[in-house]
Image: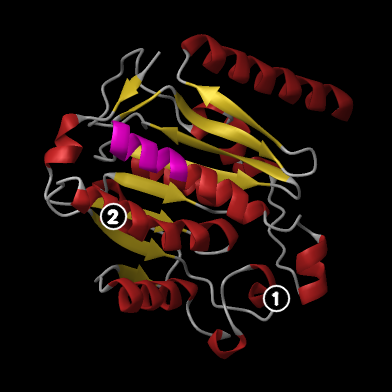
Amino acid sequence: MTHAIPDYLLRQRTIRVVVIGCGGNGSIIAMGLPYIHQALLLSGHAGGLEVTLIDGDLVSPSNCVRQPFCQAEIGLSKAAVLASRINLFWGLQWKAIPENVSNSHRVGEADLVISCVDTRSARAEIQNLVGGDARVSYWLDLGNGSDGGQFVLGQPQNRRNARRAARIRTAAELFPEIVDSTRGDDDTPSCSALEALERQEPFLNQTLASHALALLARLSRSRQLTAHGAFVSINAPRVQPLDVDRAQWKKVRRRGAWRKALRQKKQL
């Protein structure tokens, strides 16, 4: 199967993008989006991207080890630091909201929502914001563990995306456990630079985010996709694409249901 970008996104004055989370993955995504913005303008798009960064976190000492922040920025808003840096370098006017995402931020009015969060509760909140009466065309979610991760571009079920078989499924639909806040979260921050390094393989965020950015670039350039995500491994270098394929979506969901049933059996 092949997915084609809706024509209205290419006809709009600007494509409104919201990036939620400006840490390991989100910071790399944010700094890569200007390249897609420039490419859109050169290809004749009217206004390119209009980006808003949302994150309530402040830069901590451990963030300066594997995230693009420096000692002088400790205590400042991650979103504000990144937006200021991008605007200064590229001559843009992208916005920053130094708060945790909520309904007041009008996320549902964006064309593309990119979530780079590390808790199930945060993803569940985002799923609510992009669904229902929202007009979000695409939701790109990135998530990772210590040595691998995945990124999935989907079309959330809302007033803009028709309920048809060709709609590409979101990460939350394929992997319901990532929005199951009853399972708890391992969101304890690294309290030292050494711990931050030991908890995650080097360059995992850069690798995952670069693949996700390349996917968005392909969609904006060729206007169609045959894969809408991938699973990335660092220890045994491997990238497994997630095809635009209803049969594969069913297999992914069945594997998820099987793993959930196995975990529940072990707890008995």
Which quarter of the rendering shows the N terminus? Answer: top left
The span shown in magenta is 214-222
Answer whether residue 184 is magenta in the image: no
Q: Amino acid at mark 2?
A: His
Residue 192 seen: no
- What residue lies at 65% left-to-right and 42% top-to-bottom? 149
- In front: 22, or 124? 22
Is tag 1's residue or tag 2's residue first in the polypeptide sequence?
Answer: 2
- What residue lies at 46% left-to-right and 66% top-to-bottom? 55
In what element is the residue under mark 1? loop
Answer whether residue 221 is magenta in the image: yes
Left or right of residue 154: residue 124: right
Distance between mark 1 and mark 2 Cα atoms: 31 Å
Tell me if mark 2 has few (under 14), some (14-19) or many (20+) residues whose alpha carbon lies within 10 angstroms of its own: many
Residue under circle 2? Answer: 37
- What residue lies at 68% left-to-right and 51% top-to-bottom? 185
Q: Amino acid at mark 1?
A: Ser
Residue under circle 1? Answer: 62
Residue 138, horizontal then vertical, whole percent: 34, 37
In what element is the residue under mark 2? helix
Which quarter of the rendering shows the C terminus? Answer: top right
Left or right of residue 28: residue 32: left
Q: Eyeballing the image, is 186 above or below 218?
A: below
